Image: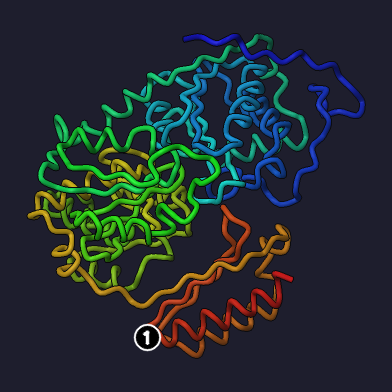
């Protein structure tokens, strides 16, 4: 079905406007807009309709070539508004827009890579609360848009200047294309031909009221599994609230209540997944990488037995993988850094402890649903018990992550300039020596400072986590 073309009147030049557009300059933060996963912030505040309109317009000018831009979204109440504004900007720049509607992030990435497209845009704040939203770009190869191109878009957004040769005429149209999601569903089953056989397995899915509600239930039912769904309708008021991959209590309870073999919890845009076994034990990204790595290693499909993860990866996982003859390469937190390192090394498996897994044998981006299918298939092939796999794997080091809210963006992103915090970190590192490690960082997706402490004993972990979190509160959060 084709909608009415989304049109924006050609603006007239104005001395008080952004050059070449007639738009009024936006009040943008001094710090970069693009973080570790696109542009993210509170809807209606940082992420307003005027900002999305201009992002669409300038991205359209910079990315302009033959082909449409694909747009998908999660269930947040602000997603429709941002999708409309982005489409208006893109069509004003001369691009056609294919709007998928509600879908996982991975659907946008996949469809961008297998069609003649300019790229894709996903509107989602992933695991963030309902009041937030985000805009993340994918290139025509299905990977996150390269940093230099993001910087070009932001520079044009701030200055209103691009190469004049790009500013040609023409209008685009917006087309509603939800039927394309069926092609993504077909892709999910391709690695298993015709689909994974999960018959005689009972699986609980926590869909977090988000993007996974569009496809996950039908995808798993097609495997023959008995599927139980919780938080299974799209709900912009409740997305990620006390559920999903960031709050596993409901999934654990459901797995026990239904005596399920396994449970999977997704985040708001379904690009990550965390599992729970029948005993309620959590299987995070470290475990998934370990299990999947073993499988690929046995098939000689893991170059140099290398797994790429981040600085958050547990030491217990790293040492267990080393004992199997593998090597773990660490990057900064963020799937874009994991992906870049994988490409540079020719690695095929990587991911994050948070459950964002990339296997380049199948996909160039994180896909929680695809990851869950592979883990379930692996469990079935191993005899049907996730608990047994956990028992035979590794013992993680005690690790604790605490988020301290720092609303002031400038103060949060410049936390390394806080002398009292830097001194506290140095004190913790000296006190623990080789018995532990500290990681403090500003989140690229939320208004928080993340404090992570990992050590040989839970006592050390708790002591230094509380000490450093208090220092952040006293020094930055006031």
Q: Residue at x 21, y 58 (%)?
A: 291
Element class at badge 1: loop
Residue sticking out furthest to the bottom: 431
Can I make out residue 210 in this image?
yes
| Quadrant of the rendered image containing residue 309 | bottom left
Quick one: label 1, few (<14), some, or many (20+) residues within 10 Å?
A: few
Residue designated by label 1: 457
Horizontal arrangement in the rendering, residue 277 relative to residue 12 (left or right): left
Task: Tell me residue 207's x, y (percent).
Answer: 38, 44
Image quadrant where residue 15 sits: top right
Closest to the observer, 234 or 459: 234
| Quarter location, residue 59 | top right
In the displayed structure image, the side of residue 65 where residue 54 appears, left or right? right
Q: Position of residue 320 (x, y in %)?
A: 23, 70
The residue at the point 49 percent across, 37 percent down is 74
Residue situated in front as seen by the camera: 247 or 350: 247
Residue 289 in sight in this render: no
């Amino acid at each position: 079905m084709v909608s009415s073309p989304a049109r924006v009147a050609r603006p007239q030049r104005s001395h008080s406007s952004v050059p070449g557009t007639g738009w009024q300059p936006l009040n943008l933060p001094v710090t970069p807009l693009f973080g570790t996963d696109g542009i993210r912030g509170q809807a209606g505040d940082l992420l307003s309709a005027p900002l999305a309109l201009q992002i669409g317009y300038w991205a359209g000018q910079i990315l302009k070539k033959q082909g449409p831009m694909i747009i998908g979204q999660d269930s947040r109440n602000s997603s429709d508004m941002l999708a409309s504004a982005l489409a208006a900007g893109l069509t004003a720049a001369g691009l056609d827009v294919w709007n998928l509607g509600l879908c996982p992030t991975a659907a946008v990435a996949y469809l961008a890579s297998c069609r003649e497209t300019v790229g894709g845009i996903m509107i989602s704040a992933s695991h963030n609360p309902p009041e937030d939203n985000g805009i993340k770009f994918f290139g025509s190869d299905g990977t996150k848009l390269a940093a230099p191109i993001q910087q070009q878009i932001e520079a044009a957004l701030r200055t209103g200047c691009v190469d004049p040769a790009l500013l040609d005429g023409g209008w685009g149209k917006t087309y509603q294309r939800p039927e394309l999601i069926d092609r993504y569903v077909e892709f999910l089953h391709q690695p298993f031909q015709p689909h994974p056989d999960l018959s005689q397995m009972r699986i609980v899915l926590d869909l977090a009221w988000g993007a996974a509600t569009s496809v996950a239930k039908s995808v798993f039912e097609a495997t023959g599994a008995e599927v139980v769904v919780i938080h299974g309708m799209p709900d912009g008021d409740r997305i990620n609230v006390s559920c999903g991959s960031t709050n596993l209590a409901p999934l654990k309870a459901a797995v026990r209540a239904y005596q399920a073999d396994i449970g999977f919890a997704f985040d708001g845009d379904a690009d990550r997944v965390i599992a729970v076994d029948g005993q309620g034990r959590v299987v995070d990204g470290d475990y998934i990488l370990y299990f999947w790595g073993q499988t690929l290693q046995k098939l000689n499909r893991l170059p140099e037995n290398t797994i790429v993860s981040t600085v958050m990866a547990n030491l217990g996982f790293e040492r267990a993988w080393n004992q199997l003859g593998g090597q773990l390469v660490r990057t900064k937190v963020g799937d874009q850094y994991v992906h870049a390192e994988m490409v540079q090394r020719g690695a095929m498996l990587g991911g994050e402890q948070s459950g964002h897994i990339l296997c380049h044998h199948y996909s160039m981006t994180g896909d929680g649903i695809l990851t869950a299918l592979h883990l379930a298939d692996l469990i079935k092939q191993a005899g049907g018990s996730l608990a047994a796999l956990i028992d035979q794997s590794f013992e993680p080091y005690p690790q604790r992550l605490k988020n301290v809210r720092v609303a002031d963006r400038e103060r949060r992103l410049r936390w390394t300039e806080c002398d009292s915090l830097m001194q506290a970190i140095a004190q913790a590192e000296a006190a623990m020596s080789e018995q532990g490690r500290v990681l403090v960082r500003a989140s690229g997706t939320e208004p928080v400072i993340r404090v992570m402490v990992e050590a040989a004993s839970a006592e050390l972990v708790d002591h230094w986590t509380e000490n450093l979190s208090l220092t952040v509160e006293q020094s930055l959060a006031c």
